Image: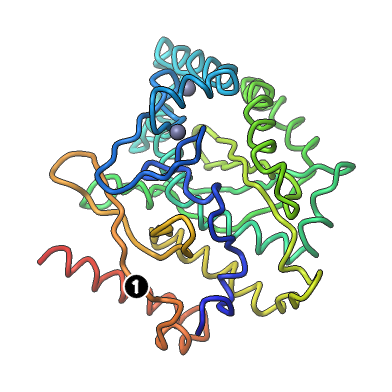
Amino acid sequence: MPIETHPLQTTFRPGDPSLLRNKQGRCRKCDKAQTPGEKFRFCKGCNVAIYCSEECQRAHWEHHKPLCQYQQENTAFFQSHPEVIAPTEPGMPNILEMQLYLRDFTEAHRPSFQGLLHAKMLSMGGTKKVLTKENPQVCLIPLKYRPPGPDGVNPALTFSYSNCVMLPRARVLADAAEHRPRFLEAWEKSAESRAHVAATFGNDLDFVDILPVLFAPHHGPAQFGYFPQYSGFEGDGLERPPSREVIAAQLDTYAMFIELGIVLRQPSATAAPIPGYMQKIGDGKKWEWRAMWTNWYSDPEWTRAKTSKDRVRLFKRKLAEAQRREAS
Ligand SMILES: [Zn+2]
Ligand SMILES: [Zn+2]
């Protein structure tokens, strides 16, 4: 199947800078991608924002400062209140550990979440219909913590995903104000960085809005993420809108990637993402991305796999094959 007509391809825009903001991803300021062997730096304050250089980090500081300071206060508060960060159930990691797991998990699966959200928009009638100024939305993604396997903490497998729900933003924030007071503060402090992200897409005619996404594990901390949403591929102009079946297949496929720990990455800035997995390096805590199926969208095996069951089976096999190659 040529790349343009693959159902998943409709949710990816080549070069979309939002796709790869992750450990091996792109600088928050200049959007430069990290190339193999290159080491980007995390902001030492919050340990979340990532930059290609000291120069970019300095230039981004005015946008990043309020959120960074809030995150630092938060961490300091947790560190001085061990009773607050204690695991809510025996065998669970503490809140600070959970925060890091959540950061790495959501960054690893960012392309899959981006695709998932776009498919969700399509299922609701299109981005322009869903994201209006009058009725701002938040997407709630409940997650369930998954204990580590024999290899240790694989950043792509620390949570399992089941569904996502669009909710009125006012309701989500009111709820947060009641149950997680500091959470509302995090929302306010992120205003500057949200505006900066939106401004980055200002010249793109297809850009509609930033969709805030609340990743909410059953236990422990929650986390906001901001995903740019585009119109297009929705029946305007020459494109035909995808059918219900195609949209359902997209939602299923991204859920499968997240569930199996399959991580999508773009091999280059203009190429479509390809599936891979996280591989543990040495005996430490470092994990690196490995491609597992380079030409998947043109592979007849994928085209033949019509049902969700077939696709899951196929991806499990491809993953096992790639891991066997790695081991030998
Ligand atoms: Zn940079
Ligand atoms: Zn920071």
Q: How far across and how far down the image is residue 306, in percent?
A: 52, 86
Coloration mode: rainbow
* Quarter the C terminus occupies: bottom left
Q: How far across and how far down the image is residue 327, in percent?
A: 13, 63
Q: Residue furthest right?
A: 134
Q: Give the amino acid at mark 1.
A: Lys
Q: Is residue 280 left or right of residue 224?
A: left
Q: Is residue 295 left or right of residue 177?
A: left
Residue shown at 64% from the left, 73% from the top:
248
Quarter of the figure with residue 257: bottom left
Residue shown at 38% from the left, 74% from the top:
315
Quarter of the figure with residue 311: bottom left
Task: Look at the image and tell me whether residue 99 can be seen.
Answer: no
Name the residue carrying label 1: 316
Task: Look at the image and tell me whether residue 10 can be seen.
Answer: yes
Residue shown at 32% from the left, 59% from the top:
277
Q: Residue furthest top?
A: 80
Callout 1: SS: helix
Q: Is residue 139 left or right of residue 288?
A: right
Q: Quadrant of ligand 1?
A: top left
Residue shown at 76% from the left, 49% from the top:
208
> How many marks are shown on the rendered structure?
1
Residue 131 position (above or below residue 39): below
- Closer to the camera in the image, 160 or 290: 290
Quarter of the figure with residue 235: bottom right
Q: How far across and how far down the image is residue 230, in percent?
A: 71, 55
Q: How far across and how far down the image is residue 302, in percent?
A: 44, 82
Is ligand 1 within 8 Å of the beta carbon of the residue shown at mark 1?
no
Residue 57 position (above or below residue 264): above
Q: Residues within 10 Å of mark 1 (few under 14, many from 20)?
A: some
Q: Is residue 111 left or right of residue 152?
A: right
